[in-house]
Amino acid sequence: MNPDQAAQAAQLPRRIIKETQKLLSEPAPGISASPSEENLRYFNVMILGPQQSPYEGGVFKLELFLPEDYPMAPPKVRFLTKIYHPNIDKLGRICLDILKDKWSPALQIRTVLLSIQALLSAPNPDDPLAEHVAKHWKENEKEAIATARQWTAMHAQG
Amino acid sequence: MSDDSEEFRSGSEDEEMSDYGASDADMDVEDDDDDYGFAGAEEVSTVPKVPYKVLPKEDLNKQREKALREVMDVLGIDEDTAMRVLRKYKWDSSRVQEEWFSKYDQVRESLGLVDEPGPSGRAACEAEERCFICFDSFPVRDMRSAACRHYFCKDCWRGYITQALSSGPACLDLRCPSTECKQKACVPCALVMELASGEEQSKYSTYMVRSFVEDNSSMCWCTGKNCENAIQCLVDRGPDEAMDVICSCSATFCFNCKEEAHRPVSCKTVKTWLTKNSAESENMNWILANTKPCPKCSRPIEKNQGCMHMTCSQCRFEFCWLCQGDWKEHGERTGGFYACNRFETAKKKGEYDDESRRRENAKASLERYMHYFERFDAHSKAREKARLDASKVSKDWLEQLADITKTPTSQLKFINEAWNQIVECRRMLKWTYAYGYYAFEDADRNSEVARHKGFFEFLQGDAERSLERLHEAAEKDLGAHVTKARNQADGGFDADAFQTFRKNLIGLTDVTAGFFDKLVKQLEKGFSSMEADYAGQVDDGAGPSGVNEGGEQAAGAAGGPAATGTTGHKGRRSKKARGVDEDVVLLGEQGFWTCNKCTYNNQDLTARRCEVCNEARAGPGGGAGNRR
Ligand SMILES: [Zn+2]
Ligand SMILES: [Zn+2]
Ligand SMILES: [Zn+2]
Ligand SMILES: [Zn+2]
Ligand SMILES: [Zn+2]
Ligand SMILES: [Zn+2]
Ligand SMILES: [Zn+2]
């Protein structure tokens, strides 16, 4: 930790420091999250596509930001890697209840990322964010999954 | 105004809750049919007389506490729980009781009501526990929890409560933040109040009061500017049933859709019409303009008066603002038939090919819409103008006039009454154009619809012509009298002329009220029986047609809380002395008379004043002779 970071860390609520330490020392399987050097509230996240999902074999980059009123308000999370998923739109925004009205301050960065990982295993086209992807999913699931695989190969590998 | 509201507010104020659920005899209004008239009028007083009540802020809290208290007593629960369960069932206390006793566990579970597991001993202990929000440890006695015993430190609770309060009334249903909390325990009001700041506490209390109105299917806020009153509906309304209300602040609006009062038109028509208007507003800009060229000399004429009778300042041509026709053809003097409310589809000439037929149809449908919209808009503006004029007259002119004419202002009340009539009639009239637009779309293809349209336009035309005369008299004749009186050089005040004016204005007010009464009733009844009714009514001038509406009245009367014993109607007892006169018998068949000011259907057939707004009864049955 350089002096600048130390100064920043002193400003940071203890909860965030503890969460960060735990994320680094005991990462959840298939998930890594590390704070950026310039801003300790900004995390670079990577999630491995879960097995038996069309995202298997892909490495998905996300950004996560803890707003000033975290943990009373939820973190802001977004996919940076392009992904074909009914609950994730072109801009990488995620439709997930715990990131909105179901947020509780007792949830953590770790639980949020685990939920996102679970969302990759179980897309929910009935609560869509990307309308046409959801439509595709409902009308021809097989084909939609094939497209998701292609996108994974194209954007999330190498 | 304040007197009126005071009166009807006190109407059912102190009625016992036990009067809810009226007995069978009360509910079954039909049984009383034979008794209608004088003898029966006393008996039917158990049905609600006033379908709504205005609740000022102070009364609101009293009512709310009363509702809470009732549920607390019957269910044996605390205030906090009572509020949660009342909110869940939209403050319908009989539903609350039903659900609470039949689905006790389910209801409690859905509200996050958790049984206290008894004192834990932990609350007092020195042991430290970790707060799962800030991850710090605290002695348990410095932490707080809901009944589920998920402890968090006070600071974290504060943050949680602040966040919830800033997100609106949903904070009334705040739950334990723990992710482990299987029961989703509710956070007690007491805990919120303990930890919230002073400002937040009052915000929370405000939400609690607001819930009594906003989560309550029989309540709404008055839509009037800066008015803090609530309106409580005292009868069972059908889903989406319109109900015009008038608040003590004089705002009038529909309880159901919150638009401006729109009797006799349904909420659905109003909504469709207003949506269409906003979609078409760009096309209609020229209609919304306040100037039109004089039909004779083309000089632009600005409409700055309420009535539709225009006079060109250049060539003195008198014409109608709406149809641009010669005004002479609008009066009775020439036997002229008032026709500018009518819509005629332009006659088609010759044969059309498909393309030009399509173009013609599009043009025709736009013209049709323009016809109705232009009139809707013109009457709407005339109403706004009349509202301003009415208050100007009663504020500035009446006292002057009383001075000049040496009559007490109470004797000049007929002027106020005329203006109130104008304002309300303009409102009814404008909505009949929304009605007409939708009701007679098929007139060109269906002869029955065309016939109904003819009847409608006839009644509407009568009402409109009468209103134009009334408006003109109240506006221009009154203005002339005032000007003359102020100007001694001109001969000063002419007492005889003023007497004539007075008689004329009173007569016009009554006649206009009658025409509108008839129009409104006919529209509410629909057209299936219109021809039959009409056949027997032609000579009746302004008499209301009185068939069949008892059904509607019975529906409105049954089931609701009994708002009885309306005070301040001392006149009721003396009515027997008056004897039976014809118009009362006629009204008796119908079971009520409609107030022309607030449009409430009064059930006391002999009353001289409206029970809701205390307006003197006008028109047929009002007995103009007995009125003043
Ligand atoms: Zn804490
Ligand atoms: Zn809990
Ligand atoms: Zn009001
Ligand atoms: Zn309405
Ligand atoms: Zn002219
Ligand atoms: Zn005209
Ligand atoms: Zn009234």
Image (tube, rainbow, N blue to C red):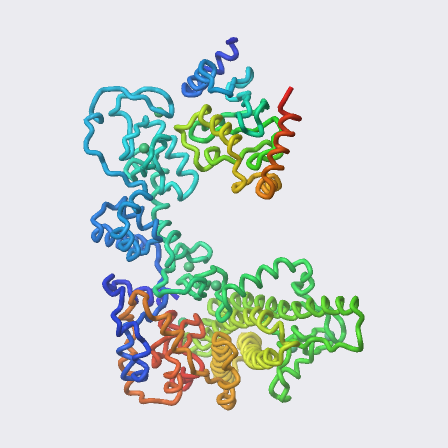
Q: Which quadrant of the frame does ligand 3 lie within?
A: bottom left
Nearest the viewer among B446 and A133 is A133
Q: Is residue B436 left or right of residue B518?
A: right
Q: Residue furthest top?
A: A2
User: Is residue B265 at least partly visible in the picture?
Assistant: yes
- What residue lies at 43% left-to-right and 82% top-to-bottom? B547
Q: Measuring from the top left, give residue B350's x and y in whole percent.
A: 80, 77
Q: Measuring from the top left, give residue B396's x and y in whole percent.
A: 49, 67
Look at the picture and state if B309 lies above or below B63: below
- What residue lies at 26% left-to-right and 52% top-to-bottom? B102
Q: Measuring from the top left, give residue A38's x and y in whole percent.
A: 56, 17
User: Is residue B465 at least partly visible in the picture?
Assistant: no
Q: Is residue B303 left or right of residue B482?
A: right
Look at the picture and state if B143 lies above or below A7: below
- What residue lies at 41% left-to-right and 78% top-to-bottom? B549
- What residue lies at 71% left-to-right and 78% top-to-bottom? B317
Which corner quadrant holds the N terminus of chain B?
Answer: bottom left
Which corner quadrant holds the C terminus of chain B?
Answer: bottom left
Nearest the viewer among B35 and B505 is B35
Q: Which corner quadrant of the image does residue B66 belong to?
A: bottom left
Look at the picture and state if B283 lies above or below B483: above
Nearest the viewer among B246 and B363 is B363
Q: Measuring from the top left, give residue B93's x and y in whole percent.
A: 29, 56
